[in-house]
């Protein structure tokens, strides 16, 4: 029902398989990272980004803006990604326990974090459903594990040898998170 009046993208691609690079490109429409001169990354770190983010443009045109994210890179490491959001909420069970540390193993709480993002996003939507809005709900869940079934991998890489990735598959399995 929602999709009838919404923009729905059936195929999406990223210029970069790296979180800050891909979201910067998504939110600005610019591929500054292709220059590879370090300036785009430095601008994100120093909070000197001069490009307007989609969230700022929409906010300036009367949209309510909210973000519910689970990745520490999107806010804690690069605060620039908070630009233009009147509500910005970061959820990570590990981070909540110790906000001074960004955990390398933050993916271990993906399911729990995703539940919080869904709950809080739905609550925000319920409160703001009559307004024009832009809501960004970000989940780390699709990040790990990078282990599609071998039948799919072999379609693209016929030489794929699952045994070569055995440790990766074991380390990233849901039973280890």
Image: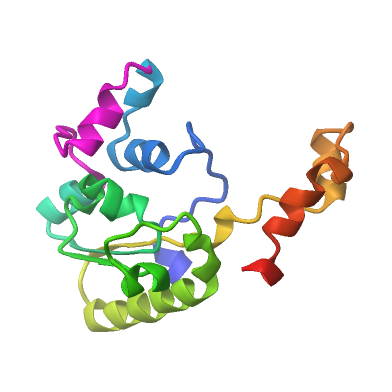
Name the residue located 47 percent from the left edge and 65 percent from the top edge: 3
Q: Quadrant of residue 154?
A: top right
Give x and y (percent) for residue 105: 50, 59
* Position in image of residue 153 (x %, y %): 80, 43
Coloring applied to the structure: rainbow
Q: Which residue is drawn at 41% across and 73% down?
A: 93
Please provide the residue range marked out in magenta.
36-54
Q: Is residue 52 magenta?
A: yes
Closer to the camera in the image, 38 or 135: 38
In this rendering, position of residue 40 left or right of residue 153: left
In this rendering, the answer to whether 168 lies above or below 35 is below
Vertical side of 116 occupied by 139: above or below: above
User: Does 46 sit above or below residue 99?
Assistant: above
- Residue 116, image x, y percentages: 40, 78
Quadrant for the C terminus, please. bottom right
Q: Is 107 a magenta residue?
A: no
Q: In which quarter of the image is residue 49?
A: top left
Q: Measuring 83% from the left and 40% from the top, which residue is drawn there?
A: 164
- Tell me: residue 123, above or below residue 131: below
**Residue 49 seen in the current view:** yes
| x then y, percent, for residue 143 | 56, 53
How many numbered discs? 0
Residue at image point 34% right, 74% down: 97
Q: Is residue 1 among what the camera can see?
A: no
């Amino acid at each position: 029902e929602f999709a009838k009046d919404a923009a729905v993208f059936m195929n999406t691609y990223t210029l970069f398989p790296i979180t800050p690079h891909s979201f910067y490109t998504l939110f600005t429409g610019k591929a500054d990272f292709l220059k590879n001169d370090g300036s785009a990354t430095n601008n994100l770190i120093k909070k000197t980004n001069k490009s307007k983010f989609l969230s700022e443009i929409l906010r300036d045109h009367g949209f309510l803006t909210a973000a519910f994210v689970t990745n520490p890179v999107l806010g804690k490491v690069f605060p620039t990604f908070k630009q233009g959001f009147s509500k910005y909420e970061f959820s990570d069970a590990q981070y909540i326990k110790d906000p001074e540390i960004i955990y390398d193993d933050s993916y271990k709480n993906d399911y729990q974090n995703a539940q919080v993002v869904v709950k809080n996003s739905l609550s925000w939507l319920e409160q703001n459903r009559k307004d024009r809005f832009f809501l960004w709900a970000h989940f780390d869940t699709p990040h790990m594990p990078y282990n599609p079934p071998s039948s799919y991998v072999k379609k693209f890489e016929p030489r794929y040898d699952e045994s070569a990735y055995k440790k990766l598959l074991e380390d990233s399995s849901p039973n280890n998170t």
